[in-house]
Image (cartoon, rainbow, N blue to C red):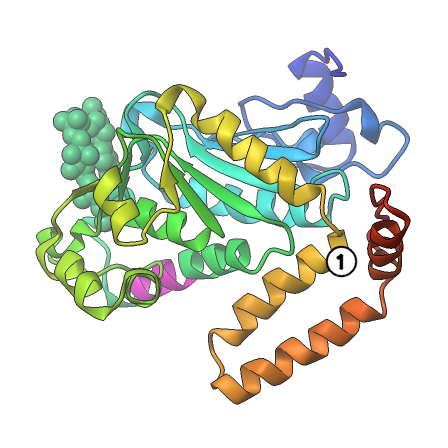
Amino acid sequence: MRLNVAISDLRQAGERLGGVLHAGKCSPRLAHIGTPLPLYFWVLFSTLLFDVDSDGIGLITVNRPDKLNALNSTVIAELDSLIHAAEDDAAVGGLILTGAGPKAFVAGADITELADIDREHGIEMAKRGARVFRQIEQLNKPVIAAVNGFALGGGCELAMACHIRLASPTARFAQPEVKLGLIPGFGGTVRLPRLVGRGRALELLLTGNMIDAEEAARIGLVNRVVPAATLLDEARALLRVMLAQGPVARRLCLRAVDGALDLTMDDALALEATYFGDACASEDKAEGTRAFLDKRPSVFHGR
Ligand code: COA
């Protein structure tokens, strides 16, 4: 159920709370009445749309369709705020990230901001973007990129920072920075080789060539290609399956996979053993195993 609140009322409410307000859209949720409000209840983002459905699935849409959703500094700052807020909001179980309009997921960092940037600001910009993308990667809730068109440069990097990628047949992927005399700055040289292997990554990085959705699926850059018309529904259905499992185990799986990638095999197995122990100590595990033995569905409480 949604409240119909006038933007002006929302703005006044936000200002009373000392908030910063931007022009844009927001979908306040009844669930938050009488409880501490998450940031996005009263901050209206100018470059992002955000909505949470009754299943706890948050949909983030990068909303600059006239610029093919290019990532300017406002998008990065707003993503930063929104990801933080979503992480702290118990009503959000998982996230889907997509782009507005028919053409693009995200067509890269905003080239108008790159044109005059010097070394020092380049480092700052890359670190800021990389930090926000890492935050997405390390979120304790599953994040699916629904890639609905061009995912170029920072767009490909944003998709790679998500846990899972679904692509429509119109999706196109590239790291075209070399064509601009640049290299990726938001993790492209780091995540692409891990996802597709060093040889394929270097081919994409050194040529800047664009590949289609089928090729991206073939090399493991995306999980699978789904029809454009059902892309968001497929992402929601996938998240719903994940959200039906034990919440403690879900968080531990995300942490174990992220942690293990930087470790040796032995250290990674030791880390997994620790998290396995944590899972064994959870109420969710007691409930999940008991429900199996009782031949009934589990009722998890995320403890
Ligand atoms: N940064 C800033 N603006 C961008 C952008 C980017 N990364 N990508 C697209 N845009 C803008 C275009 O400048 C254009 O704006 P305008 O209408 O004010 O001129 C608008 O988005 C539409 O793009 P356009 O180039 O007209 O669309 P197209 O269908 O002809 O081409 C692309 C689509 C994606 C092939 C082309 O826009 C492109 O090559 N973009 C840059 C991709 C890139 O190099 N990304 C990595 C940056 S590090």
Query: Does dot 1 land on a helix, a strand or a loop?
Result: helix
Specify the quadrant that holds the C terminus: bottom right
Q: Main secondary structure of the magenta part?
A: helix
Q: Is 166 left, or right, of 39 in this rendering?
A: left
Specify the quadrant that holds the N terminus: top right
Camera-side residue: 269 or 206? 269
Please tell me whether residue 275 is drawn above or below residue 226 in the rendered image.
below
Can you give x and y, in whole percent of width and height, for residue 232 in the image? 48, 27
Please tell me whether residue 194 is drawn above or below residue 209 in the rendered image.
below
- Whether the magenta-drawn stretch holds residue 212 is answered as no
Q: Quadrant of ligand 1?
A: top left
Q: Is 145 left, or right, of 96 in this rendering?
A: left
Q: How many marks do you count on the picture?
A: 1
The answer to whether residue 181 shows anywhere in this view is yes
- The residue at the point 72 percent across, 59 percent down is 249
- Whether the magenta-drawn stretch holds residue 126 is answered as yes
Camera-side residue: 52 or 265? 265
- The residue at the point 73 percent across, 37 percent down is 18
Q: Which residues are magenta?
A: 121-127
* Disc 1: which residue: 248
Can you give x and y, in whole percent of width and height, for residue 38 in the image? 74, 39
Type of amino acid under label 1: Val
The answer to which quarter of the image holds residue 203 is bottom left
The answer to whether residue 59 shows anywhere in this view is no
